[in-house]
Image (cartoon, helix red, strand yellow):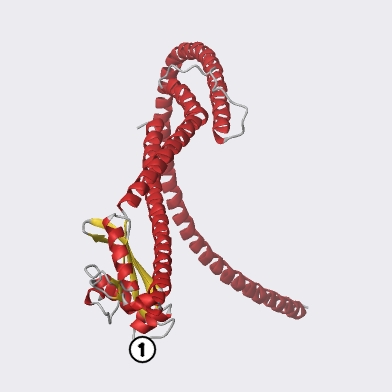
Amino acid sequence: MRIGTKLVLALGVLATGMIVLGLWATYHQEEGRLRTLLEEEGRIIQAQVEVTRAYIAKNYVGKLKKSSLGTQLHVAREHEEDPHAIPFPATATQEIGKELGKQGVFQARLVSDQPMNPANAPRDEFEKKAMELIKNGAESFSDVQILNGVPTFRRASADLASVEACVNCHAGKQLGDVIGLLAVSIPMASAQASMAGSVLNSGIWMVSIIVVCLLAVYWFVHLFVLKPLRDLSAIACDIAQGQGDLTKRVPVGSGGDEITELARYFNVFIEKIQRAILMVNEGTNRLASSTVKLSTTADSVVRAAEGQDSRVVQSASAVEEMTMTAGEVARNSTDAANLAQETAQTAKSGQEVMEQTVDGMQQVSQAVIHAASMITTLGHSSDQIGEIVRVIED
C-alpha cells in the first residue's frame, strides 16, 4: 500500500474520529446547556407560582375574609359547583398548573406529606425522594424522566409558608417553615428537537471545517512530502532496474526541511556512485591493457620454456648419474665409517698395549739403571783388584 493511500485512510479515520468525538461533545454540551436552561426555567416557574399563590392568599382570600363579602363567600377546595365558594390558594395553584399541563407548557402541583387534600400526597418515587431530600435540608431536586411516553424535566423545590394565610391553613407551622414541595414538570420534546437541530447544524459546520482542514493537510503533505518522495523513488527505481542514468538529479528545493535534506544527500550519493563507476571503468581499461601485455609476456615465457625442455632433460640425465654416483659414494662412505670404527677399536686396543709396554719399559729402565749401578760398583772393584795385581806383580 502506497504512502498516499495510507495517508488518505489515516486522514479518513482521523476525520471520522474527530467528527464522532465532536458530535458527542456537542451533544453533551447542548444537553448540559438544555438542562441548565430547564433548571433556570424551573426556578422561574417556582418563583411565579409562589408569588401568585401569595398574592392570591393576601389580596383575594385575606381581603375577602375581612370584607362584608366574607359572609356571602367562603373558601373551599370544592368550589366549582358552588357559586359562593372561591378556591384555596393551593387549589388555585393546582388547577392553574393542570390547565397549563393540558396545553403542553408545564405542569405544577403542590405536594405535602400531610395534605389537607389527599390528592396532594406524593404520587411516585420522584416526589417521595424529593420530599425526603427537602425535609433533610435540600433546596431542590431535579431529574429527567419519561412521563406518558414524553421525556420530561421534573423539578421539586421547597414550598414555604410565606404569608399568614398559609400559617392559618397549616396548623403548627410558622412563617418560613416548609409545608411541602412544589413539583414542576416541563415537557422536553420541543426543547430536544431544538437541541437536535442545533447539534445537527453544529455537526454540519464541524464536518465541513474538518474536511476542509484535512484536505488542506493532504494537499500540503502531497506537495511537500509525497511528490519529492515520488521523485526519489523514480530515480531509485531507474537505477535498480539497470537502466539508470547517473547524470540525473532529484530537484532540490530551497527549504531546509527533512525532505529537502534527503533529496540533497541522495544527489550526493548518486554523484559518488557515478564517480566510483567512472573510476571502475578507468581501472577496467588499464586492466585490459595490462592483460594484453601480460599475454605477450606469457607467450615469450612459453617459448623460453619450450627451449628449456631439452636442457631440462639433459639436466635430468646428469642429475640421475649424479644420483647414482652419490649412491656409490654413500655406500663407500658407509664402508669407510665401518672401517674407521674398527680402526678406532684397534687403536683403543693398541693404546692399552702401549700403556702396558710403557709400564714394562719403565720397569726395564729401572732394572738397567740398577744394573748400571752394579756395573759401576763392579768397575770400581775391578780397578781396585787391578791395582792389587799390579802391586803383587811389582
Please state which of residues 202 and 354 is positioned toward the viewer in this rendering.
202
Q: In x, y percent, where is residue 326?
A: 43, 33
Task: Identify whether 373 is placed above or below 282.
Answer: below
Q: State which quadrant residue 289 falls in.
A: top right
Please state which of residues 228 and 197 is positioned toward the viewer in this rendering.
197
* Residue identified by numbered label 1: 172
Q: Is residue 285 left or right of residue 74?
A: right
Please state which of residues 360 and 58 is positioned toward the viewer in this rendering.
58
Q: Secondary structure at mark 1?
A: loop
Question: Residue type at mark 1?
Answer: Gly
Does residue 17 appear in the picture of this structure? no
Task: Identify whether 22 is placed above or below 34.
Answer: above
Query: What residue appears at the point 49 percent right and 56 percent down from the top-left corner?
Result: 347
Please state which of residues 105 and 128 is positioned toward the viewer in this rendering.
105
Q: In x, y percent, where is residue 260?
A: 57, 30
Residue furthest to the bottom in view is: 172
Label 1 CA crowd tier, 10 Å (few <14, some 14–19, many 20+):
few
The quadrant in which the N terminus is found is top left
Query: What residue appears at the point 49 percent right and 32 percent down from the top-left corner?
Result: 216
Does residue 339 appear in the picture of this structure? yes
Q: In x, y percent, where is residue 200?
A: 37, 42
Q: How many marks?
A: 1
Q: State which quadrant residue 52 falls in.
A: bottom left
The quadrant in which the C terminus is found is bottom right
Q: In x, y percent, where is residue 148?
A: 21, 58
Query: What residue appears at the point 36 percent right and 89 percent down from the top-left corner?
Result: 172
